[in-house]
Image (spheres, rainbow, N blue to C red):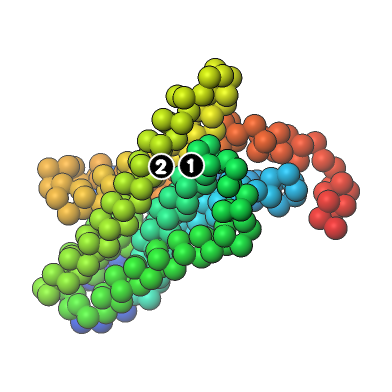
Amino acid sequence: YSSYLGLAMKFTNHSQQNPTSFLLTGIPGLETSHFWIAFPFCSMYALAVLGNMAVLLVVHLEPALHQPMYMFLCMLSTIDLVLCTSTVPKLLAVFWANAAEIAFGACAAQMFFIHGFSAVESGVLLTMAFDRYLAICRPLHYGSLLSPESVRKLGAAAVLRGLGLMTPLTCLLARLNYCSRVVAHSYCEHMAVVKLACGGTQPNNIYGITAATLVVGTDSICIAVSYGLILRAVLSLSSKEARAKTFGTCGSHLGVILLFYTPGLFSFYTQRFGQHVPHHVHILLADLYLVVPPMLNPIIYGMKTKQLRDGVFRLLKQSPEDLNKIRK
């Protein structure tokens, strides 16, 4: 711990316009508990990787699941794997090995993956809401409007929009003069790095909050409208069984949406306006935001979606020889 403080003092006392590295502090105020805090994070990360890999494998091996809904779910699982893998291994290195130093390029890359793929995930959640709207409110046009080609185009649009909006956010870091290299965070979050600059951060602040508000605001409004129309259509169904089945299918998606947006918005606006929120509480929630949703998303869909749940059970019953035959 004393060597950690010495390294922090060395980095703080040497300003450099283009720093070669930063120092991640982990969770400020809870440094003595880092070793034990790492265990639940490691467990959640392992579950996230296993769960999302299982979703990808089941959808790949089950021809009956080669439908738009499950294609979008595969996109979501891939994004979740990118988000948690871009942060948790380094976070565990900080907590367990005190490997706090991160190169400037690696820090910028981590920031790009976190913010870029968070924006991509928001876009994918919007396309999933559109998918549910078409399936429930426009079932006769579902197949023609959501062809495999349309699914690919919607996925590509979500990727291009998310990464395109967040690329300038990362590039703006290079223009700043840094007075400190100690990032009071467990990973390279945009505002946590920008706060280290001596001045001239207004373009970063304006672009960051504008891009995030544009993405979240537009997507959340469209998702709310989609589910408002879905709710109206479901309530008009005469069959209780049909209403229950529809609510079950949409309930899993709504749970994933709330799980993604609620902690994400809290962390984003707390970094800018939440001066009265204890710093360790904010950082801990920001860390959990990048590992809890990826861990729970496969569980939520696995519990609520019968076809996926049955696919997992069939996969578990297959022998290695049967799996090789399916792949061929």
Residue named by callout 2: 226
What secondary structure is marked by label 2? helix
Q: Are marks 2 and 1 in contact (CB under 8 Å)?
A: yes
Label 1, residues with CA under 10 Å away: few <14, some 14-19, many ≥20: many
Q: Quadrant of residue 15?
A: bottom left
Check disc 1 and give the amino acid type. Tyr
Q: Position of residue 124 (x, y in %)?
A: 47, 53
Q: CA distance from mark 2 to mark 1?
A: 6 Å
Q: Position of residue 64 (x, y in %)?
A: 73, 44
Quadrant of the snapshot with the C terminus:
bottom right
What secondary structure is marked by label 1? helix
Q: At 12% across and 75% down in the image, what residue appears?
A: 200
Q: At 20% across and 48% down in the image, what residue appears?
A: 270
Mark on residue 133?
A: 1
From the viewer's side, name the closer residue of 317 and 238: 238
Image position of 16 with respect to 220: above or below: below
Q: At 51% across and 60% down in the image, what residue appears?
A: 154
Q: Quadrant of residue 311?
A: top right
Quadrant of the snapshot with the N terminus:
bottom left
Mark on residue 10?
A: none
From the viewer's side, name the closer residue of 273 and 133: 133
Image position of 155 with respect to 20: above or below: above
